Image (tube, grey):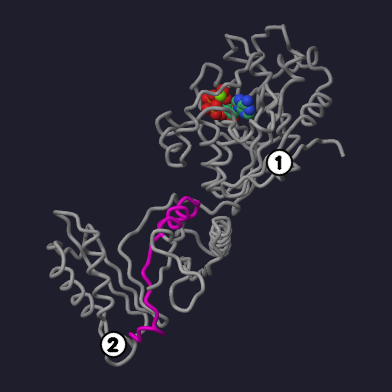
Amino acid sequence: MQFRIIVQFAELALKGKNRHRFIRRLRKNIKDKLKILGYEWPVKAIHDRIYVQVPGAEGEAESIDEKTARAVVHELGRLPGIAWLSFVYWLSEQRFGFLGEKPDLLVIHELIERLAQEQYRPESSFAVRVKRRDKRFALKSQDFEQQIATTILKSSDWQQVNLSRPDQTFYVDIASDGVSVHSEKIMGVGGLPVGSTGQVLTLLSGGFDSPVAAWLMAKRGCQTDFIHFTASHRPPEAIEADKIVRTAKIVSESSGFVRLYIVPYTYFDMALMELDLEYDLILFRRFMARVATRLMPDVEAQALVTGDNLGQVASQTLENMESMNKSTEAMILRPLLAYNKHDIIDLSTQLGLFEVCREPHKDCCALISKNPRTKSRADVLEKMEQIYLSDYESLIDDTLNDAQVLTFYFGRWVNQQQVGTEE
Ligand code: ATP
Ligand code: MG
């Protein structure tokens, strides 16, 4: 017996060229993710579905056991763009000859028997769906469905058949090259394959919101990089354990290629030190937006993303967001603006981020005053910047020269290097 994985593309309503492009991208993401897991398995796209062929026992050098193959299904299920996936038992025509005149269907019945026993839930109903894609198969779909249902009723505790709204469906698909049998649809996260709609740069802080904001953009097909502003330089030996680094790494498990720029804000801090301005928080936001904007061409980002959530903290007002917007020409996206906190927490759990996000973030902002302004006006802020941060371009240059970048690929850290804006 061999295994296959069926992957159903999520956005079925999409039409035309985009649809083909998105499916091609999903296929590539699946291939890349498999490769990083150490598997170079054939991945084929046929209509709205993608089929992953797991190397099996029939004459192939590599043979994968069921447990490993199921773990791979789970990993693939985290990629955006997938409605559902199925783990499929595959019986090849070459070996079993189902399309012959008097096929021996025992192997299919035995498999169904096993699945029925494994899947049994009391008080539940079932149905069997046979699809006869190759009409050379001797039995009509309906007759074979009845035969299989009889096997299930006889050999397991399932007693209730319900053809219109079954709790459990057993699928048998008869094609020219073989028969596939499956009984589970594992839900994917939906959305669009990463890399199909654009490139963004997310401002990543130590809380729940910004990684979830990045994840929502990834789910709509955007590739994302991160920029994090920090008070402290990290010694190389402390990098791997760092909360921000682990957060970026987890996002990359689903979203693939992710660069994390860690940027100390020493120069900004020094310029405003001891002034105790009540506007310093929004000045900092404008500073972050400008430094991130400078980085955008390098990472080919089309927009910045933040985890802003209206009213969540006193400074998250429309006025302050506007003051941040006015500091840059770049588009700033705030996918969480109207979310409730518990929805954000749910999303962080879905992504496997909850545990890391709830850890305390030690990198506290020494420079931020205790009572930040809840309202601000861009013209007032500009005047302050002219006084206290008069050489803004050099401030950005110096800041980015101190940056460190880490690159992740599907949850693996692939390199670490110093970057600067100077050639
Ligand atoms: P989060 O949960 O993402 O930390 P928050 O609720 O703490 O957000 P703020 O601290 O007000 O909200 O920050 C709002 C947004 O500004 C963050 O979601 C993030 O996008 C950005 N941001 C804040 N601090 C930093 C930082 N040190 N580095 C990069 N981006 C930051
Ligand atoms: Mg924060």
Q: CA distance from mark 2 to mark 1?
A: 59 Å
The answer, for residue 97, to whether it is visible in the render is: yes
Report the span colored magenta: 70-98
Q: Nearer the viewer, residue 340 or 417?
A: 417
Tell me if residue 363 comes above or below residue 111 in the rendering.
above
What quarter of the picture does the C terminus occupy?
top right
Tell me if residue 269 comes above or below residue 215 in the rendering.
above
What quarter of the picture does the N terminus occupy?
bottom left
Local packing at callout 2 (Cα closer than 10 Å; few below 14, some 14-19, many 20+) is few
210 to the left or right of 54: right
Report the residue marked by disc 1: 416
Report the residue marked by disc 2: 103
Does the magenta portion include 414?
no
Find the residue positioned furthest to the bottom. Answer: 101
Tell me if residue 353 comes above or below residue 117 in the rendering.
above
- How many numbered discs, if any? 2
292 to the left or right of 113: right
The answer, for residue 308, to whether it is visible in the render is: no
Percent of width and height locating residue 43: 52, 67
Residue type at tag 1? Gln
User: Helix or strand or loop: what does disc 1 sit on?
Assistant: strand
- Asked if disc 1 is less than 8 Å from ligand 1, the answer is no
Residue type at tag 2? Pro
